[in-house]
Amino acid sequence: MKRRRRYRRTGLLTNEDEQSPLTGVANLFDIAMVFSVALLIALVMSYQLPELLSPTDDITIVKNPGQQDMKIIVKDQGKPIEVLNMTDEIGGGTGEALGTAYKLADGRVVYVPEEENKTST
């Protein structure tokens, strides 16, 4: 007599390649990273400063102009971003006057350089 081999069909619920329960956590981390980068780009775009993301653009930002806690943020091409806290030592010193700046009624500032008196003989 021949013996019949019975093959047991595995159901859908039993899987030989069972996955680890932590596999989904890695996917959540990837989604969180993509979301945080998208949020950062949206924040930069909302302040209309896409120059901060460009490696070739130079930008200078003045925070709290004319106040005691004024800061100047400078981004030059190929250099690290510098934050300058304004104090009397940084903004003060000796030098020579180069001209006069005037603030117009519409908010623009106009710089008028001093003329040098040259006498030609």
Image (cartoon, rainbow, N blue to C red):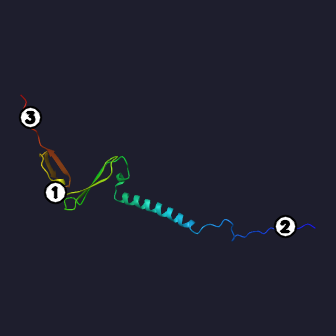
* Quadrant housing residue 66: bottom left
Query: As displayed, is residue 73 above or below residue 6?
Result: above
Q: CA distance from mark 3 to mark 1?
A: 35 Å
Mark 1 element type: helix
Residue topped by disc 3:
118
CB atoms at circles 3 and 1 under 8 Å apart? Answer: no
Q: Position of residue 42 (x, y in %)?
A: 40, 60
CB atoms at circles 2 and 1 under 8 Å apart? Answer: no
Task: From the image, state whether disc 3 or disc 2 is nearer to you.
Answer: 2
Depth order, front residue of 95/102: 95
Query: As displayed, is residue 98 above or below residue 67?
Result: above
- Tell me what residue is drawn at x 33 percent, y 48 percent: 79
Dot 2 amino acid type = Arg
Residue topped by disc 1:
88
Residue 57 horizontal side relative to residue 91, left or right: right
* Quadrant housing residue 114: top left
Mark 3 element type: loop
Q: Quadrant of the N terminus?
A: bottom right
Q: Residues within 10 Å of mark 3 (few under 14, many from 20)?
A: few
Dot 1 amino acid type = Asp
Mark 2 element type: loop
Q: Position of residue 30 (x, y in %)?
A: 50, 61
Dot 3 amino acid type = Lys
